[in-house]
Amino acid sequence: MLLFSYTVTSLFRYPVTPLYPSLPLQTMTTEELEQLLAQQPIALLHRLARGRVQRHFRAGKRRLIEVLLRHSAENRAGFESDLMTLIGEKQVRPAPPMPQAPTARKPKSTAPQRRSTHRPVEPESHEPGVTLSSWLEGLGVPPSKPFVPDAWQEDAIAKLREGDVVVSVPTGSGKTYVAVEAARRAISENRTVIYTSPLKALSNTKYTEFSKIFGADQVGILTGDRRDNGQAPLLIMTTEILRNLLYDAGGGEIDIRLDTLGLVILDESQYIADPERGVVWEETIIFCPSQARMLLLSASIGNPHDIAEWITSIRPTPCHLVRHSTRTVPLRAGYLHPNGKLTPLFRTVGIPHGHPSHLHPEAKRLFLQYEDETLPSGRRR
């Protein structure tokens, strides 16, 4: 029996970090934005595409502009801000010095050279910083309200009838709801469901959670430490355990039935890009029985479309990608000094994109205070 391992590399997104403040930003039409992009050198377009366009280094200038324009529709203001920042950086970059006549070389000093520890000074923003009370406003348990599934959740459940599904949505958006409803439907059709996670602790948590939802007699767990109710219709396990079960099935030795398997849920599927453990997810997908549907869940996978295309190429049914980019639970960034002082990390309540100069003045002061207290005198700026 030959085993083939496919490698899928996850490309994680990083924002373009400007070194200089952006130029005044005005709203541009798509045509004006396209003309502005066409005037820029290809090197600047590649920098703008970093974290936005997969394999941008292989695209020509015309193709790269088309892809960037399509991507800019998701966040036009942030895209234009990053573009103008890069243009401003190019304009203020000093010209190379003119060649001078050769002069006599100075003898090299034998004294050790000390490397400068001065850091580049970030331009100050004149925007006033948010107060701590404003930053904390609204935090807490939200009022209860009737649950209404989002459109992407209903879409993911519906597409599982047609084939496999990759769900890529932000943390806290409701991936577990999709897993629960898909499992409920499979169990009602007398099919076995296997839910995997990369960690034993997470598997134990899901075992407790699903036992409350489906009933303790309907849920079992198989990990290296626990084996409870192994014949239950819904089994919780680590991904390594499932991979080993599929290995055993290929060799004719197995202690659970896979012929009734109807759904395999791979939670935290971004682990497929892990240099050491990623092969476990690859082999699990490759050896998963063809009659079972696969549901991959992730909040941080960088190239879900590539994963969906790869699964489609090796499985008998198509793999659909369900993507949702709006955060249901917004993020706020703060800084807690060891002395107990809490302050917003940025000048705004939310997290700005690509603007390191937007640090809160109080956070900067606490940073410097911490350096003065901890760093040797020679390394302080």
Image (cartoon, rainbow, N blue to C red):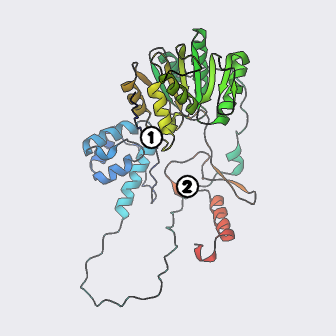
Q: Is residue 210 left or right of residue 86?
A: right
Q: Is residue 327 visible?
A: yes
Query: Residue 70, percent across and down?
Result: 36, 36
Which of discs 2 and 1 lies nearer the camera? The answer is 1
Q: Residue at x 44, y 51 (%)?
A: 16
Label 2: element kind: helix
Label 1: element kind: loop
Q: Nearer the viewer, residue 361 or 231?
A: 231
In terms of image quadrants, where is residue 240? top right
Q: Residue at x 73, y 21 (%)?
A: 212
Q: Residue at x 72, y 16 (%)?
A: 217
Dot 2 amino acid type: His
Query: Residue 247, percent across and down?
Result: 50, 27
Q: Nearer the viewer, residue 28 or 156?
A: 156
Query: Residue 93, percent across and down?
Result: 36, 65
Dot 1 amino acid type: Ser
Q: Nearer the viewer, residue 242 or 119?
A: 242
Q: Which residue is mark 1?
A: 10
